[in-house]
């Protein structure tokens, strides 16, 4: 299972590719970012918003409540019961961008 940061990176890759290939205009960037990331930006800070109820509830309980108490790998293990496994992300990204 990918974490929120992993999704952030994947979304950035897609948005940057759209900017580079001309399918996304720079003036539309903030709107697309907010739409895809489900976040609102206030005075330079990011806060969660727009996530489906069950996902938001799970993230609040399993991830956000801990703040910086745990390192990423420990938090991932606590939240999902297993260590980080990049293989699914690598397969997905390879199939999408290298195929």
Image (cartoon, rainbow, N blue to C red):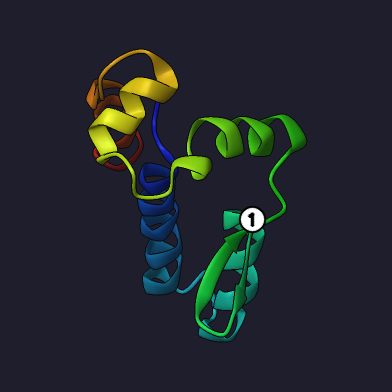
* Residue at 31% across, 14% down: 82
Number of residues whose C-alpha sits closer than 10 Å to that of mark 1, classed few (under 14), some (14–19) or many (20 or more) = some
- Corner quadrant of residue 58: top right
Residue 85 is situated, as x and y percent measured from the top left of the image, at 25, 22
Q: Indicate left or right for 43 with 6 as reference.
A: right
Q: Is residue 70 above or below residue 27?
A: above
- Judging depth in this view, the residue of 31 and 67 nearest the camera is 67
The residue that appears at 71% across and 29% down in the rendered structure is 54
In this view, 25 is above or below 7: below
- Left or right of 3 in this view: 43: right
Residue 25: where, in percent of width, then height?
Answer: 54, 80
Q: Which residue is mark 1?
A: 38
Of all residues, the one furthest to the top in this rendering is: 81
Q: Looking at the image, which residue is at 42% across and 49% down?
A: 67
In the shown orientation, is residue 70 left or right of residue 54?
left
Residue 7 percent across, percent down from the top left: 43, 44
Q: Nearer the viewer, residue 21 or 4?
A: 4
Q: Quadrant of the N terminus?
A: top left
| In this view, 51 is above or below 96 | below
Residue 64 horizontal/vertical position (percent): 51, 44
User: Image quadrant for the C terminus?
Assistant: top left
Question: Label 1's element?
Answer: loop
Residue at (24% x, 39% y) in the render: 98
Q: Residue furthest right?
A: 53
The count of marks equals: 1
């Amino acid at each position: 299972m990918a974490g929120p940061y992993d999704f952030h990176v994947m979304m950035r890759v897609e948005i940057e590719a759209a900017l580079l290939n001309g399918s996304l205009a720079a003036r539309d960037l903030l709107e697309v970012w907010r739409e895809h990331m489900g976040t609102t930006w206030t005075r330079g800070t990011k806060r969660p918003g727009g996530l489906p109820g069950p996902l938001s509830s799970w993230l609040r309980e399993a991830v956000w409540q801990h703040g910086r108490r745990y390192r990423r790998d420990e938090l991932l293990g606590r939240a999902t019961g297993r260590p980080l496994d990049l293989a699914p992300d690598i397969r997905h990204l390879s199939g999408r961008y290298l195929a």
